[in-house]
Amino acid sequence: DAGVTQSPTHLIKTRGQQVTLRCSPKSGHDTVSWYQQALGQGPQFIFQYYEEEERQRGNFPDRFSGHQFPNYSSELNVNALLLGDSALYLCASSLRQGELNMNTEAFFGQGTRLTVV
Amino acid sequence: AQSVAQPEDQVNVAEGNPLTVKCTYSVSGNPYLFWYVQYPNRGLQFLLKYITGDNLVKGSYGFEAEFNKSQTSFHLKKPSALVSDSALYFCAVRDIRDSNYQLIWGAGTKLIIKP
């Protein structure tokens, strides 16, 4: 059973460019969340996708956008890259279930290391 | 507002000794609590969770955590540390009433186990 897979693993971009990161959730999971983790810090929530819609968003500018496909995979797009966008980007998948739509624990991919120069 | 505090940036323990990594939380309602571990240049791996029931939760790799409602704490423990336990540990919380699964994360504690 494949876990959460992210691609690419590493990426170097120039300021002002655009980047797309990809995530395939764990088999059976329907919810994808994206996090940004700067060096030496904890993950910061970017947004979450469920049923192909953005359901919740953290404190990130509109330059950060995403998409979820019918097969539950997801993309994170970042426009007009800044040096400060350099970080490890983590994708986490989970499954909504139960009367209160409670999710199972999140499973994380290995992340995409984005370096902006 | 929900928050998580991991008061120690780093914890040093000798191999074979017991270890504790501290976590306190603040939520409006009842908490879902999680511990994750992160090895260098890797994603986060789930260790254990508290949802309801027994306050002592057992997880992967011999780790356990004790939920203490009165102290709003969820400390991670292991009776005998291994060098391979050296990693970055994150505590996370979610309000049980939050149907939009957003975890609030602590800043992380670096655990160093010395041989």
Image: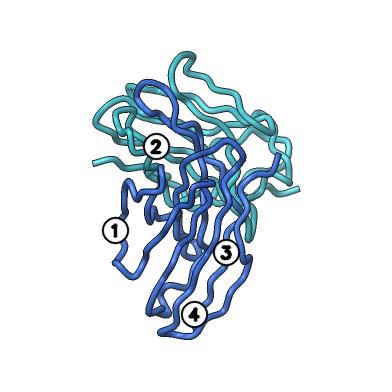
Chain colours: A blue, B cyan
Q: Chain of mark 3?
A: A
Q: Looking at numbered disc 2 in the image, what kind of residue is underneath it?
A: Val
Question: Gap between marks 3 and 1, in whole Å?
Answer: 20 Å
Q: Looking at numbered disc 1 in the image, what kind of residue is underneath it?
A: Asn
Q: Would you call the spot at circle 2 few (<14 residues within 10 Å), some (14-19), or many (20 or more)?
A: many
**Mark count:** 4
Left or right for A12, reference A80: right
Left or right for B34, reference B70: right
Decide which of tag 3 and tag 1 comes sooner along the chain: 1
According to the picture, the residue beneath numbered tag 1 turns out to be: A59
**Place of residue A114 in the rendered image (x, y in percent of width and height, measured from the top left):** 53, 71
Question: Gap between marks 1 and 2, in whole Å?
Answer: 18 Å
User: Both on one chain, marks 3 and 1?
Assistant: yes
Please, what secondary structure does the residue beneath circle 4 have?
A: strand
Q: Looking at numbered disc 4 in the image, what kind of residue is underneath it?
A: Val
Question: Gap between marks 1 and 4, in whole Å?
Answer: 20 Å
Residue drawn 43% across the image and 40% down it: B92
CB under 8 Å between discs 3 and 2? no
Residue B93: mark in rendering = 2
Residue A112: mark in rendering = 3
Please, what secondary structure does the residue beneath circle 2 have?
A: strand
Question: Gap between marks 3 and 4, in whole Å?
Answer: 13 Å
Q: Nearer the viewer, mark 3 or mark 2?
A: 3
Residue drawn 34% across the image and 50% down it: A54
User: Both on one chain, marks 4 and 2?
Assistant: no
